[in-house]
Image: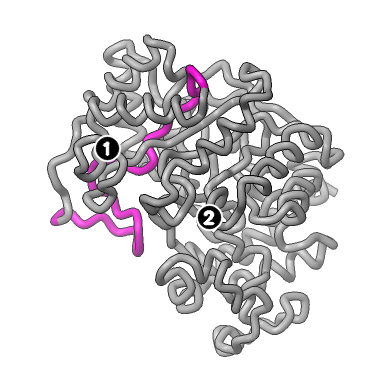
Amino acid sequence: ASRSVAIREARKATDMRYNKLGDSDLLVSEVCLGTMTWGKQNSEAEAMRQLDMACDKYGVNFLDTAEGYPIPLQPETAGDTDRMIGKWMANRNREKIVIASKLCGSSRRLTWFREDGKGTRATRKQIIESVEKSLTRLGTDYIDLMQIHWPDRYVPLFGPNKYDISMETAAVSFEEQLEAMNELIQQGKIRNWGLSNETPFGVMAFVSLAMEQGLAKPISVQNSYSLLTREFESGLAEVCSPSHTNTALLPYSPLSAGVLTGKYDVLPDPKMATLEMPEKAKIFSPFEGANPKSRLNLLKGYRARYESSAAPAAVAEYCQVAAKYGMTPSQLAIAFVASRPFVPSTIIGATSGEQLEENLGAFACEFTQEMLDDIEDVSSRYPDPWRTPQPGGG
């Protein structure tokens, strides 16, 4: 009987649950609405409809944006996502909404964000400039959570997760970044700050320094986490544990850029998947796969990386686990992430209202020990099947 024990209780889709975010006094919905498609894959009208639906019908009070959104990061569209949110918020009670945003880490390529026309760095000057501009675009006088989108120092963000010592470069000190964030907190321009695409070393360094100096520490880390990307569970889970630094994980891409919906499945029908892999994975008949607007095709090199990895085989097995419990692949993937004890809120994004409702509905599902056992069985055969974060998210 213990295997059918609910690790996560079922609830009505519209009965939102709220959790405290790390050490902060923020109370956030267990669903955070991601926004990075607004202004590129989604129009302003669609963005407004998503916001109204998520907040009014489902009780979402937590939004995640970034100075660079929408993706892909381009000078023509930069800041458009913020402007849409600002427009929507003009008719809302600001105090009831928790806004998270992100400022660019180190990039020589991104030359259109700063006054000096150079690339982005997490220097004091740039952190302050970025926050001022974000406040203007959002039409608000404070941001609840300002995150550093990716580190200023070298970290192996893209491709294989191997740290290459020869890639190290001069970086902005942890101290300078910490002090700039604290200055902005003192001024009331941001309420809290956090990290994103960060490593155990980075979280530990920032928190230790903050404790030592009596400054506000980062309260959260926004990293990729899903059935296919469980890297957080090793080093970071220990660092972020409530009994250590109590840093909340805000997982992005719980569906691994939509891959875990089964819609890109290179198997003809995920429910019929036979597990003779990887031969079968080479058959090419996805039903979303040809859509040039879908994420796998929109971002350069994304699709080839997916198809050459062990991910399609793992996805096929997770689809079977979902079918066993009468769930869609998305429901299983989201219920898994939402059930993790280190996750106070899961970031979901959608390109259609229908997709958004399906994703919001997935939080209603029960998640049991038996489901977890079946997932761990697949996971043990496909450890770390796919590690492919993208600049700018997902």
Magenta stretch secondary structure, dominant: loop
Magenta-highlighted residues: 140-166
Q: Which residue is mark 1?
A: 114
Residue in the image at 42% along x and 39% along y? 67
Q: Earlier in the sequence, mark 1 or mark 2?
A: 2
Q: Position of residue 152 (x, y in %)?
A: 26, 40
Please say if 302 is above or below 333: below
Q: Height in image: 338 above or below 15?
A: below
Determine whether, in the image, residue 32 is placed left or right of residue 197.
right
Q: Nearer the viewer, residue 260 or 108?
A: 108
Task: Please determine whether, in this image, residue 44 is positioned above or below residue 318.
Answer: above
Quadrant assignment, res 325: bottom right
Write the residue at 44% across / 26% down.
136
Residue pictured at 82% horizontal, 50% vertical: 4
Amino acid beneath label 1: Arg
Judging depth in this view, the residue of 248 and 27 nearest the camera is: 27
Asked if marks 1 and 2 touch (Cβ < 8 Å), the reply is no
Q: Position of residue 195 (x, y in %)?
A: 40, 35
In which quadrant of the rendered view does residue 281 lie?
bottom right
Check disc 2 and give the amino acid type: Lys
Along the line of sight, the residue nearer the viewer: 385 or 193: 193
Q: Is residue 2 magenta?
A: no
The percent coordinates of residue 178 (x first, y second) are 29, 23
Residue 40 is tagged as: 2
Residue 142 is marked as: none
Relative to residue 356, is residue 29 depicted above or below?
Answer: above
Distance from label 1 to label 2 (Cα)?
22 Å
In reply to whether residue 162 is colored magenta, the answer given is yes
**Is residue 235 in view?**
no
